[in-house]
Image (cartoon, rainbow, N blue to C red):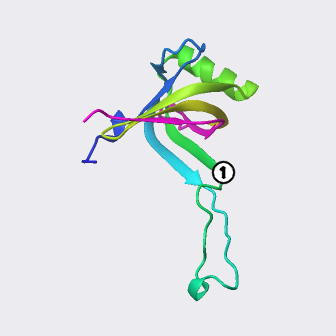
Amino acid sequence: MTAQKGKDLLLKLDSDGSGTYLTVAGLRTKTFTINAETVDITTSESSGRWRELLDSAGTQQARLTGKGIFKNAASDATLRQFAFQSTIRNWQIVIPGFGTVTGPFQISTLEFSGQHHGEMAFDITMESAGELIFAALDA
């Protein structure tokens, strides 16, 4: 993957379940993390006493964190509603030069902040809530 603009990492939401994804919020910083829990199967007979892991056995999870400003009043209201109601919806994360990740996420943290001489901002953390589908960019 070649160098890409950070602003091109997009967060899109299917707010009504119709399969139409709209970009929400003006995220200025974004981090998308995929984790796989490991299952240690090391025994006293493991070669050289090196740790051994069980292939494809752990729980997988993804997390998206971001900081930004709301795009408009509608996206502000939608994110607040989803956070207060612990709503799980399909989201799409567009990773430039890589592909898209689509699947259910739940907002686990929504924080608001502001400086006296600046705009109101928010921090968001979203946790995966089911199977995620990766679609690579066409080469």
Residue visible at 49% across and 17% down in the picture: 72
Q: Is residue 61 above or below residue 17?
A: below
Q: Is residue 116 visible?
A: no
Q: Is residue 20 visible?
A: yes
Bounds of the magenta segment: 113-139
Q: Is residue 117 magenta?
A: yes
Identify the image quadrant of residue 104.
top right
- Which amino acid lies under the numbered mark 1 shown in the image of this protein? Thr
Q: Is residue 53 above or below residue 59?
A: below
Q: Is residue 76 above or below residue 10?
A: above
Is 76 placed left or right of 68 in the picture? right
What is the x, y in percent for residue 44? Answer: 70, 85
Determine which residue is flagged by label 1.
59
Is 108 placed left or right of 66 in the picture? right
Residue visible at 66% across and 36% down in the picture: 129
Q: Residue furthest right?
A: 85
Few, some or many residues within 10 Å of mark 1 (<14, 14–19, 20+)? few
Is 124 placed left or right of 99 in the picture? right
What is the x, y in percent for residue 131? Answer: 60, 36
What is the x, y in percent for residue 81? Answer: 68, 21
Residue visible at 52% across and 15% down in the picture: 19
What is the x, y in percent for residue 12? Answer: 48, 25
Circle 1 SS class? loop
Decide which of 76, 18 is in the foreground and name it: 18
Question: Quick one: quadrant of the C terminus?
Answer: top left
Is 104 placed left or right of 86 in the picture? left
Q: Is residue 127 magenta?
A: yes
Residue visible at 70% across and 80% down in the picture: 43
Decide which of 106, 35 is in the foreground and name it: 35
Decide which of 136, 98 is in the foreground and name it: 136
